[in-house]
Amino acid sequence: YNQADIQITTQGKVGIGYTTDDNFNLNDYALRVYGNVTGTYTPSDERLKKNILTVPDGALGKILRLRPVTYNYDGQKLLNVKTDTITDMQRKANVEASIQNLEEDIHTGFVAQEVMTVFPEVVKTGGSDDQMAIDYTALIPLIIKAIQEQQTEIDALSAKVGKGPKK
């Protein structure tokens, strides 16, 4: 299937916002979107799950090992697009503008190689050059667990302070 800016390969991989002129390697990803994606939901119904276990204690110590960073993307590498092969001039201008925006915009996140040492289950490696990606949504329950652990520590300290010697 090849309609306007949508590519669907014979392997069922999907590219949105790309044309064949963009010269990108869609086979690296199950879904690759050139543009913003909003309003995503993850199935979470108990009836769809098995082997449900509470996240073990220790999340706080792990969360504290993460290093939040700010960064700019290398737009050319991120989009894996060779602009010199795009023949449609408007499309080429749009891709070049997107690359420039990616390189100018300041992003906040983590470095996947660092996260891999703490939470390997939230880092995926793939593509022809083994690029790493973080499932940021998967970090949410771990962060909540860390907050719960921290609250338990705060409550214990508050109880100690409340029971201290009276003046």
Image (tube, rainbow, N blue to C red):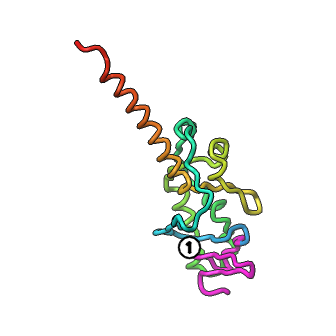
Residue that extends furthest to the right in the rendered view of this protein: 128
Viewed as shown, does residue 45 lie left or right of 2? Answer: left
x and y, in percent, of residue 135 in the image: 59, 56
Q: Could you tell me which residue is drawn at 66 percent across and 48 percent down? A: 120
Viewed as shown, does residue 153 lie left or right of 24? Answer: left
Q: Residues within 10 Å of mark 1 (few under 14, many from 20)?
A: few
Front residue of 113 and 140? 140
- For residue 4, which quarter of the picture? bottom right
Specify the amino acid type for callout 1: Ala
Residue 9 vs 158, above or below: the answer is below
Front residue of 37 and 3? 37
First to last magenta residue range:
1-26
Q: Could you tell me which residue is drawn at 33 percent across and 22 percent down? A: 161
Q: Secondary structure at mark 1?
A: helix
Circle 1 residue: 93
Q: Quick one: quadrant of the N terminus?
A: bottom right
x and y, in percent, of residue 129 in the image: 76, 58
Q: Could you tell me which residue is drawn at 51 percent across and 51 percent down? A: 141
Residue 132 included in the magenta stretch of the image: no
